[in-house]
Image (spheres, rainbow, N blue to C red):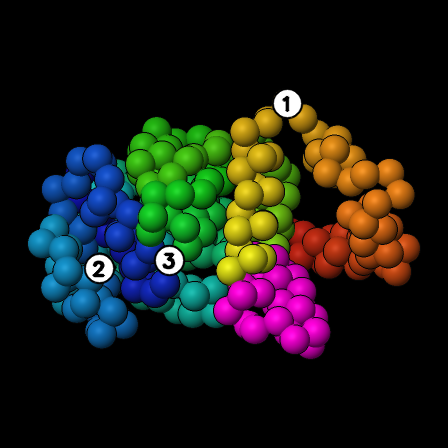
Amino acid sequence: MIYGFIGTGTITAAMIEGMMSSALPVSGVIVSPRNADLASSLAERFSQVRVATSNQAVADEAEVLVLAVRPQIAEDVLTSISIPPGRTLISVIAATSHEMLSGWTGYDAAQIVRAIPLPFVSYREGVTAIFPANSAASKLFGAIGQAIESDDQDEFDVLAAASAMMGTYYGLMENISGWMESHGMPEHKARAYLTQLFGSLSQVAARSPSISYDQLRRDFSTIGGLNEQVFKGFNENGGSVALIDALEGVLARIKK
């Protein structure tokens, strides 16, 4: 299978890095020349990767075509090329609907797969939401992590909104680390402690899929204890409400 990427940015690089260390059968990978430094770097690192002369050349040769340009320039880029029929078209362009993509590519909306790969795919980790279900897309993202096929557009949009929590996650760790440092803790010790703490908590949840988050919170919070006190303070000071409001705002933006 020949894979092509229109747009050579962080997610494209992460996907290709994951693909190159996976068991996915790849005849070749063609990347667009727009980000010349990154494109040439990928071609130098991986023998299967080559840089095309233009976006049109990528569209002409690829059997699976991944659209990975920034939303702000997506219309200009996609309307400037002609995508031949018969391609498996996968868009990883954030907050860009099937209808918009259809208008720009000439493909029927039902033929376009939208996906939300996250940077972890470079290590073949994490989960990628896709919609609609598509065997080629599931094979690709299953090889570089885990693929989850959304049942409908609403479910896909909710997953897209939840994926916007990455910055908040690190922001939370940043705030806690800063607080620890204000009490004399060296930054490297605070980081090492928090990274292992949060990583271990995620592993507990991964190993206990039948236990709800609510129950895990209770299991890790002694009644009248310190963990219960922190969550209560967070909740009573508007933390939970602010978080849900932020997610609702992102969801509304995605659905525009």
Hey, what amino acid is under mark 3? Ile
- Quadrant where the C terminus sits is bottom right
Q: Main secondary structure of the magenta part?
A: helix
Viewer-proximal residue among 16 and 219: 219
Residue 36: give x, y in percent of width and height.
22, 73
The answer to whether residue 52 is seen in the rendering is no
* Disc nearest the viewer among 3 and 2: 3
Q: Are marks 3 and 2 in contact (CB under 8 Å)?
A: no
Badge 2 is on which residue? 31
Label 2 secondary element: strand
Residue 101: give x, y in percent of width and height.
45, 52
Taking the view exactly as shown, the residue that stands out farthest to the front is 184
Viewer-proximal residue among 173 and 225: 225
- Count residues near mark 2 (Cα–Cα under 10 Å), then give few for <14, some for 14-19, many for 20+: many
Displayed quadrant of residue 76:
bottom left
- Count residues near mark 3 (Cα–Cα under 10 Å), then give few for <14, some for 14-19, many for 20+: many
The numbered disc on residue 210 is 1
The answer to whether residue 77 is seen in the rendering is yes
Viewer-proximal residue among 17 and 206: 206
The numbered disc on residue 11 is 3
